[in-house]
Structures are given as structure tokens and as C-alpha cells.
Image (cartoon, rainbow, N blue to C red):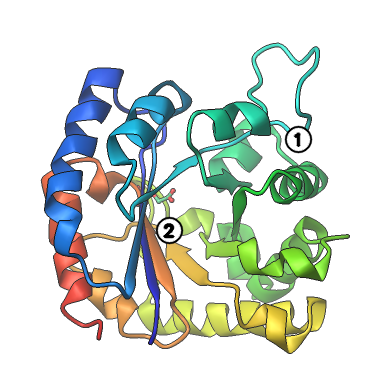
Amino acid sequence: MRKFWLGSGWKMHKTISESLSYAKYIKNYTINNKPSLSLFIVPPFTSLYVVSKTLQGTSILVGAQNMHWEDSGPYTGEISPLMIKDCGAEIVELGHSERRTLFGETDLMVNKKVLSALRNGIRPLICVGDTFTEKNISKAESFVENQLKIALQNVPKEYGSLIMIAYEPSWAIGIDGTAANPDYVNHMLSFIKDTLHKIFDDQVAELIPTLYGGSVNLQNASRYAEKPNIDGLFVGRASLEVKNFIEIIKSVESILV
Ligand code: PGA
């Protein structure tokens, strides 16, 4: 059975009470979800605990948007893997393009975070993706390949089954972004899968889901979900209203077995 991942990333949105209403609403809706669908929600740190508590006992996983690689220490303003785990996070989003471009996160930092997440039993959702510059000079593949190779450096293969990858080109994300063509995403995820086969062995690489994120909405979600290499979608803006996210869930579910 094909398993499909569908996540909602809230970025810097929602107070605790707004998060709580969202979590309560989605909890009631998702009781009868298809088992082939794996839902996850990635709230801001401040809402992580309440969202995890509210969704406890459901199949919806909760993730953090970032973390430091050390378990504790003199890192003012940072949040550690132990802290996000303590708040109920089972996933951590790492290397999102906003972290890379606005906050100077490098491939090496992403690698340290990936290793730390795995050591702590947290699933890293590693975001990779090209910018306009690489896309325009047809360097998207080599750019993403390099990001993947560095992010996954020294990862022991027994941790492979915890890893998730999201292809999120920065030109597709946000209010100024243009949703990538589903065939193009399918191609890029096939390339990413091939790269994972080179980094790990076939058995491990086949366990790693490859998702897409960037201007996914109700109109286009099922067109992505139909593509064989797209194992999931990570939705930003269009999922901030819980009712909209539920409509997206329904449209994806309608084409899942
Ligand atoms: P968007 O964000 O859906 O608002 O474009 C996606 C993302 O950054 O993951």
C-alpha cells in the first residue's frame, strides 16, 4: 500500500489559543482517515506542547520547525532536540529555505542537526531545493544533489528509515512563489530518489519518503498526489485555516487507495 504524507507547516503564525482550536478541530475530523495517509502538523515552538498534547493518541504526528544540534548549553535563544522531544515533537523540519536564506543556515549546520535529530530518535524532515539562480542556469539537480550529500554525511544507514526529504525550491514558496509543475516535481523527486540510492543502499533509500512543498493548495494538491515519485506534500499558507487544510486532505484522500 502506498503511504502518502501530508503536512501543515505554520511558520511564524498562531498564538497558543489559535493553535489549540486548530488542533481540536482537526482531531475530530481525522478519526476516520484512510490508513494510507500520514498527517503531520508543524506549529511554532510556543504551541508545540499544546498541539502535541491535544493530538496525543491520534495518528497525527507533530513536528518542530527547527532545533539546535546540541542537547543543552550556552546557546541563548536556541531550542534543543531534548526540548522539542519533551514537547512531543516526533519530526523536526530542518534546512527550510527561509532558514537558509534569512538566517544563514548552511549545509554543514543542517548536517549537524540531522545527525543530532537521528541520535535523539526524531525524524528529520530535510528540506532541499534550488533558487531561481540555479534553476535558470539548469543547475537545480546538481545543487540539490550537493545539499543532500552534505545533509546526509556520516548518517549511519540504520537510521535511514527515520529520514524524510522535502523538495522545496525557494522560487515556489510563499506569496511571491509559483507552484512547481507536477511533472517537474515528479522528475526532481525521481532525481532525489536516485541520489538517495547512491548515498545509502537500495533497501534504505526505498524507505525514505520524498515530499514536495511550495504553493500547494486545494486546486493543485491532488495533481501532485497522482505522481508516483511524490510521496507527500508539505503545505504552508493554504493550510493555515484548518477548514482549508481539511479540504486539501479530502482531495488527496480521494485519490489514495
Ligand atoms: P507555501 O509554503 O505553501 O506557503 O508556499 C510552503 C513551505 O514553505 O513549506
- The circle on residue 69 is 1
Q: Nearer the viewer, residue 152 or 132?
A: 152
The secondary structure type at the circle numbered 1 is loop
Q: Which mark is residue 141?
A: none
Task: Note whether 56 is above or below 103 in the view shown.
Answer: below
- Please report the residue visible at 14 percent of the width from the left and 51 percent of the height from the top: 244
Mark 2: give few (<14), some (14-19) or many (20+) Cα within 10 Å: many
Expressed as whole percent of the image width and height from the top left, the position of residue 62 reads 42, 44
Rounded to the nearest angstrom, the CA distance separating label 1 from label 2 is 28 Å
- At x 53% / y 62%, what residue is drawn? 166
Decide which of tag 1 and tag 2 comes sooner along the chain: 1
* Residue type, mark 2 in image: Ala
**Which residue is the site of mark 2?**
172
Q: Where is residue 212, by image quadrant? A: bottom left
Left or right: 230 in relation to 251: right
Q: Is any part of residue 152 visible from this angle?
A: yes
Q: Quadrant of the C terminus?
A: bottom left
Between 5 and 61, the one nearer to me in the picture: 61
192 sits left or right of 236 in the view: right
Question: In this orientation, does residue 178 appear?
Answer: no
Residue 121 on image: x %, y %? 66, 49
- Regarding mark 2 in the picture, which secondary structure is present there? helix
Q: Residues within 10 Å of mark 1 (few under 14, many from 20)?
A: many
Q: Is residue 41 above or below residue 256?
A: above
Residue 28: percent from left, percent from top: 13, 47
196 to the left or right of 64: right
Q: In which quadrant will I find the N terminus? A: bottom left
Please give the name of the residue rendered at 43% of the width and 58% of the height, measured from the top-left corner.
172
Ligand 1 near label 2 (Cβ, under 8 Å)?
yes
The vertical placement of 111 against 231, above or below, is above
